[in-house]
Image (cartoon, coloured by chain):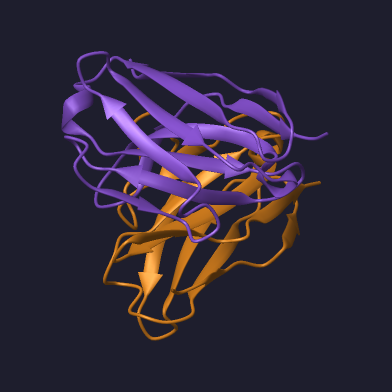
Amino acid sequence: QVQLVESGGGVVQPGRSLRLSCAASGFTFSSYRMHWVRQAPGKGLEWVAIISFEGSNEYYADSVKGRFTISRDNSKNTVYLQMNSLRAEDTAVYYCAKGGTGWTNDDWGQGTLVTVSS
Amino acid sequence: NFMLTQPHSVSESPGKTVTFSCTRSSGNIASNYVQWYQQRPGSAPTTVIYDDNRRPSGVPDRFSGSIDTSSNSASLTISGLKTEDEADYYCQSYDTSTVVFGGGTKLTVL
């Protein structure tokens, strides 16, 4: 079955960088778009970014554009989120999600917590 | 960009039927698929409805989805409510270059 396992979360100071990884298994990774979605403590879901099947197209939420970069390595079945210039408001659980029809999601990982604090 | 508006909370009794709404602020609700996710406390979201009205395998047929172009909204209906249905429910759709989630509806079954 589909498995998505995020890693790389932790505590980081404002202005610093962090890279999240999401290892995928149980499906043909290169045939699906992949997303990152985040959830701040006690808040709702917020879409962060999407990457195309082969990695040539990326789109971002306005709140992270210019600071975050989504990428993928289809040989490793892994999607990444490079987060630079982190702010306190980036504190959240970050989920990777397998793309569904169009730009929807279907399967989700369990998430990794990122805390931006001095 | 558009918004998806959901009621903040809904309460209903076990065995009853509840319907959640998700209203799209601009653009046609039928232009892009709507997805519904269930999130129990402390857990990741799971898909309960995809492509407007389709159920993933393993989701009981008590869950159904629909769209209404006259009100530019989507709906999730849960019949025969069980206490295990108590959770947050989010709608999601997309447009050119963006994905949008509704703010979520907290369902209390009491």
Return the x and y of residue A86 as percentages of the image width and height: 64, 41
Depth check, front residue: A22 or B78: A22
Judging from the image, what is the letter of the chain drawn in purple? A
Q: Residue at x 74, y 60 (%)?
A: B9
In the image, A26 versus A90, the foreground residue is A90
Q: Position of residue B81 (x, y in %)?
A: 63, 45
Which residue occupies the foreground of this view, A82 or B38? A82
Where residue A54 sits, quadrant-wise, is top left
* Colour used to depict chain B in the structure image: orange
Q: Quadrant of the C terminus of chain A?
A: top right
Q: Residue, x 34% and y 58% (percent of image)? A: B52
For this orientation, the residue located farthest to the bottom is B70
Disc tally is 0
Q: Position of residue B32 (x, y in %)?
A: 29, 65
Query: Is residue B62 something one can see in this rendering?
Result: no
Query: Residue at position x 47%, y 51% from top?
Result: B36
Is A13 left, or right, of A26 in this rendering? Answer: right
What residue is drawn where x is 35% and y is 45%? Answer: A50
The image quadrant where one finds the N terminus of chain A is: top left
Q: Is residue B103 left or right of residue A59?
A: right
Location of residue A81 in the rendering, given as x and y in whole percent from the top left corner: 45, 33
- Residue B71 higher or lower than A45, as above or below: below
Can I make out residue B41 in this image? yes
In the rendered image, the vertical position of residue A22 relative to residue B17, given as above or below? above
